[in-house]
Image (cartoon, helix red, strand yellow):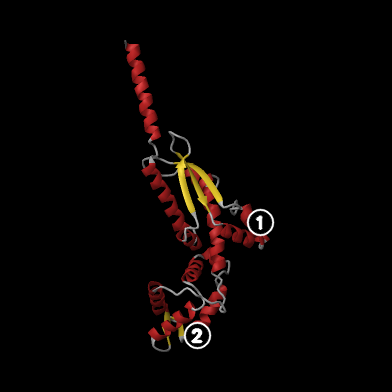
Amino acid sequence: MRLVLASVITLLFSVSSASAQAECLDSNTLQKVNNNEINYMLGRIPPAFSDAVADKKITFKMHVADTGTCKVNFEVTLPESDVREANLLLAADPAKKIILFSQGYVLPETTALSAAFSVEPVSLQINHADTLQSGELGKLRASIEMMYAMLTQKRADIDEKAQNNQPWSAEFRQQQFAKCSKQLESTQQASTACECQISKTSAIASERQIRYVEYVDSNPYAQATGASRNFAEVKSRIQLACGLKKTGS
């Protein structure tokens, strides 16, 4: 009788354990892990990435890798045009390619990327080893970040002869006006001078391009590439024409 009871208890324990494992990452938990990872990438990767996500050019999919485990597969599908553009940019700079590859960085060569990693079901924390550059998720993150850093820097290069056909939103114009009023002095009425700068700048650059420039200017590593140097000269000429100069200069 004791042997039978022990067998029943063992069986119930096994069933309970299997059930707990199966529920390690239920659909709601999996969705939270997926959202957390997307938000992490949006917060870290340069803005050309978030724009591609907003345009629904990038898709994400996450599913349990093995039934009854806390391991998942994360799949990211990138736009073919972005993958191609980034690889052409790197191919045109062999020295940079050698340096980056020697540091373990590689660009995506296909549109479909995937990584498997383990998740702690209570805290939803990803296994630290999986986030390192030697781990699958770490490699995926670094690869996408490198790609969109290059694209952001390239798109921050704005020519003064360019034409912008995408009007700035009222909110963005207001943000730029506030920055102008705070950072610049005017030799004439401040509001008129700032409106002048906004008018001339919006004629050649979109909101997104300005955000790319601002990202490059705020990031020492991106700034060192000289990506926004051309637009800096254009902006200086616009400010001069509008009677503006940096505060305190």
x then y, percent, for residue 240: 50, 85
Residue that appears at 51% across and 79% down? 235
Q: Residues within 10 Å of mark 1 (few under 14, many from 20)?
A: few
Q: Can residue 139 be seen in this view?
A: no
Quarter the N terminus occupies: top left
Q: Name the residue under label 1.
A: 98
Apparent side of residue 114 relative to residue 195 in the rendered image (left or right): right
Q: Picture quarter containing residue 196?
A: bottom left
The answer to the question of whether label 2 and label 1 lie on touching residues, with beta carbons closer than 8 A, is: no
Q: Which circle marks residue 10 in the picture?
A: none
Q: Can residue 41 be seen in this view?
A: yes
From this viewpoint, which residue is outermost toward the bottom? 188
Q: Which circle marks residue 240 in the picture?
A: 2
Kind of residue at badge 2: Leu
User: Could you tell me which secondary element the residue under label 2 belongs to?
Assistant: helix
In the image, 55 versus 134, the foreground residue is 55
Residue that appears at 55% across and 71% down? 228
Residue that appears at 38% across and 42% down? 27
Above or below — where is 218 with respect to 247? above
Kind of residue at badge 1: Ile
Residue that appears at 48% across and 78% down? 201
x then y, percent, for residue 77: 52, 52
Q: Distance between the residues labelled 2 and 1?
A: 41 Å
x then y, percent, for residue 110: 59, 52
